[in-house]
Amino acid sequence: MRALARFPLLFTRQAATTSVAVQTSAEAPALLRYLGEVQQRCSRQMQEQQRCIAGLEARIGQLQHELLRRDAEVRALRQRIDAEAAGEVICRTGCLSHDDHWRADEQCRLSGLPCHHAEAAQTAEKD
C-alpha cells in the first residue's frame, strides 16, 4: 500500500475511456523504478549487516584470545602461590621443628637468606 501512496498520480483512476492496458503500461516503469530502489536499499543493508557481523566475529576472536591469556595468567599465579605456600610449610617445618634442620646461624639453608622464622621462634621462647 505504501508503494501506491508514493505514486498517487500514477494510480488515480483514469477517465472511463482509458483502457486497463494503457493504465498498466504507464504504471509499470514507476513500479520497476521503485522495486529497483528497494532492491538497492536491501543490498546495502545486507552488506552493512555482513560488515557488522564480520566485525563482531573478529571481536569474539580477540575476546577469546584475551580470555585464554588471562586463564593462563591465573593458572601461573595459582601455581606460584601453591609453590610459595608449600615452600613456607617446608620452611616452617624445618626451621621451627625437627631440630632446626633448615636453619644455620639464623640463615635458611635452602635459600641462603636470613630466616624470618628465627625471630618468631626466639620471641616465642622468651614468652
Image (cartoon, helix red, strand yellow):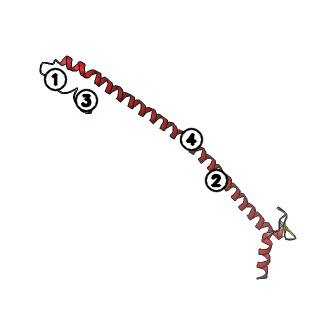
Could you tell me how far apart the alpha carbons at marks 1 and 2 are, in whole angstroms? 79 Å
Tell me the element at label 4. Answer: helix
**First in sequence: mark 1 or mark 3?**
3
**First in sequence: mark 3 or mark 2?**
3
**First in sequence: mark 1 or mark 2?**
1
Could you tell me how far apart the alpha carbons at marks 3 and 2 are, in whole angstroms? 66 Å
Which amino acid, by three-letter code, is at mark 3?
Phe
Position of residue 40 measured from the top left corner of the image (x, y, whole percent) = 39, 28
Q: Residue at x 82, y 62 (%)?
A: 111
**From this viewpoint, which residue is outermost toward the left?**
16
Q: Residue at x 22, y 30 (%)?
A: 8
Q: Residue at x 45, y 32 (%)?
A: 47
Count neighbours of disc 1 (C-alpha within 10 A) and say few if under 14, some if 14 to 19, many if 20 or more: few
Which residue, given by chain and number where applicable, does mark 4 sit on?
Answer: 61
Which amino acid, by three-letter code, is at mark 1?
Gln
Q: Which residue is nearer to you in this view: 6 or 81?
A: 6
Q: Is residue 44 above or below residue 28?
A: below
Work out whether residue 18 can be spotted.
Answer: yes
Count neighbours of disc 3 (C-alpha within 10 A) and say few if under 14, some if 14 to 19, many if 20 or more: some
Q: Which mark is residue 7?
A: 3
Work out whether residue 96 can be spotted.
Answer: no
